Image: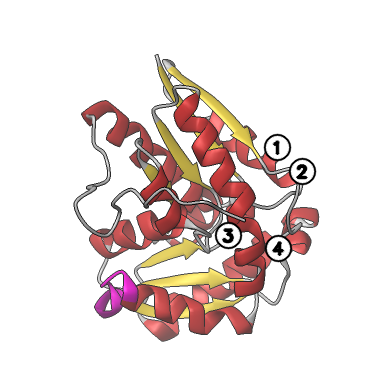
Amino acid sequence: MMRILVINPNTTESMTDHIRSELEKIKRGDTELTVVNPEHGPVSIESAYDEALAGPPTLELVRRANEEGYDAVVLACFSDPGLDAAKEVSGIPVVGIEEATIHVAAMLGHKFTVMTGSRSRVPTREFHVRLRGVENSYASSRVLGMSVLEMDADPDKAKARILELSRQAVEEDGAEVIVLGCAGLSGYAEDVERELGVVVLDPTSVAFKIAEAFADLGLRHSKVGRYSVPPVKEIK
């Protein structure tokens, strides 16, 4: 049996429950799925400050996953908070939903557009596509104008906004793939794809399936350079 831990790095349990419900629909029969969130930290992650606050409790959950015999970890936040540090301290693969999905998006179409909650996060999306080396495949980010908690509380409004902005991205930006840039948007991809006829990616589902594949193949992060184990030191 394969065991995968999915971490919602914010503390909103309704979002954790939503992620669990969607992943239960797609997991393999022999995969044991556990979805958790930290007890302490921000209720949503919408800034670099939120990412920094979410980092330590998320890393503690990654450390525990290694101790408890999990085969892989998924960080279910589109900002991938603490991802590099998690890869350093982990002997099992840690898959960030943003990193995984923008690479997949670049494989599935000429250009992709990311749906994001607020305008202030657009520069971060632009920075991350450059960091991951997929800037030539990036068409745009489209702003939903909704907070993460609003998306979680009003799924009908969120879905309507996604559909409206995705249509604009296809017609005006040349997008061939739409990326739903928030873990709280899990479960909306199928309806939008059916309506518009373009590929729509739910990052949590994509990353989860990649985690299953990594575990199947016995793949791990290379420890010879960027993700080498950090030196042990006293922390005061």
Q: Is residue 55 shown above or below 114?
A: above
Question: Which badge, 4 or 2, is on the more N-terminal residue?
Answer: 2
Q: Residue at x 38, y 49 (%)?
A: 87
- In the image, what residue type sits under mark 4? Val
Q: Secondary structure at mark 4?
A: helix
Q: CA distance from mark 4 to mark 1?
A: 15 Å
Q: CA distance from mark 2 to mark 1?
A: 5 Å
Residue annotated with mark 2: 14
Check whether the beta carbons of the residues at disc 4 and disc 1 lie within 8 A of each other: no
Between 194 and 116, the one nearer to me in the picture: 116
Residue 107 position, x and y percent, is: 24, 60
Check whether the beta carbons of the residues at disc 3 and disc 4 lie within 8 A of each other: yes
Residue annotated with mark 4: 148
Q: Is residue 194 shown above or below 26?
A: below
Check whether the beta carbons of the residues at disc 1 and disc 3 lie within 8 A of each other: no
- In the image, what residue type sits under mark 3? Cys
Check whether the beta carbons of the residues at disc 2 and disc 1 lie within 8 A of each other: yes
In this picture, which residue range is highlighted in magenta? 131-137
Question: Which badge, 2 or 3, is on the more N-terminal residue?
Answer: 2
Question: Which badge, 3 or 4, is on the more N-terminal residue?
Answer: 4
Residue annotated with mark 1: 17
Question: Which badge, 4 or 1, is on the more N-terminal residue?
Answer: 1
Q: Secondary structure at mark 3?
A: loop
